[in-house]
Amino acid sequence: YILLELLAALKPRFVIDVTAGSGTNVELCNDFGIRVLGLDLKDGFNALRESVLGRAGEPADLTWSHPPYWDVKKYS
């Protein structure tokens, strides 16, 4: 519910989720009519080598990220 609270408080117009995973936060933004860009390693976005701003093409009002679920996925 953290993102839900942030969306309600900040009322962003454009959100970038750099760890989109299965897309739950992207769906939440879509439900609220908020423009959103979901990026993820599984879709080819490498945050260590690529620019979030370069991929988005414009600054976001809110950028969301969290560490990977280390005990669920094996990242190599």
Image (tube, grey):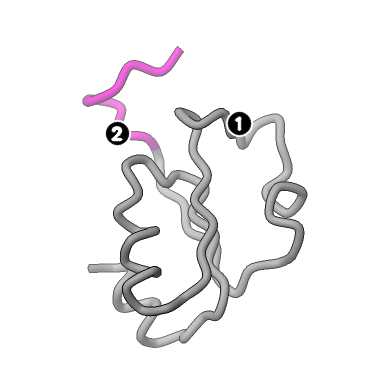
**Would you identify the image quadrant in which residue 74 lies?**
top left
Q: Position of residue 36 (x, y in %)?
A: 51, 64
Q: Which amino acid, mark 2? A: Tyr
User: Which label belongs to residue 46?
Assistant: 1
Q: Is residue 53 left or right of residue 22?
A: right
Q: Secondary structure at mark 2?
A: loop
Give the class, few, some or many, for how many residues have Cα within 10 Å of label 1's Cα (few <14, many ≥20): some
Q: Position of residue 27 (x, y in %)?
A: 33, 61
Question: Relative to 13, is 38 above or below?
Answer: above
Residue corresponding to mark 2: 69
In this rendering, which labeled residue sits more in front, label 2 or label 1?
A: 1
> Where's residue 51, x and y in %?
73, 43
SS at circle 1: loop
Q: Amino acid at mark 1?
A: Asn
- The magenta segment is 68-76
Q: Is residue 44 above or below residue 63?
A: above
Using the image, determine if residue 26 lies above or below residue 13: above
User: Is the magenta region chiefly helix, strand or loop?
Assistant: loop
Residue 10 position within the rendered picture, expressed as x and y whole percent measured from the top left: 47, 85
72 magenta-colored: yes
Do tag 2 and tag 1 residues touch (Cβ < 8 Å)?
no
Q: Is residue 75 magenta?
A: yes
**Residue farthest to the top?**
76
Query: In the figure, is residue 11 to the left or right of 22?
Result: right
Q: Quadrant of the N terminus?
A: bottom left
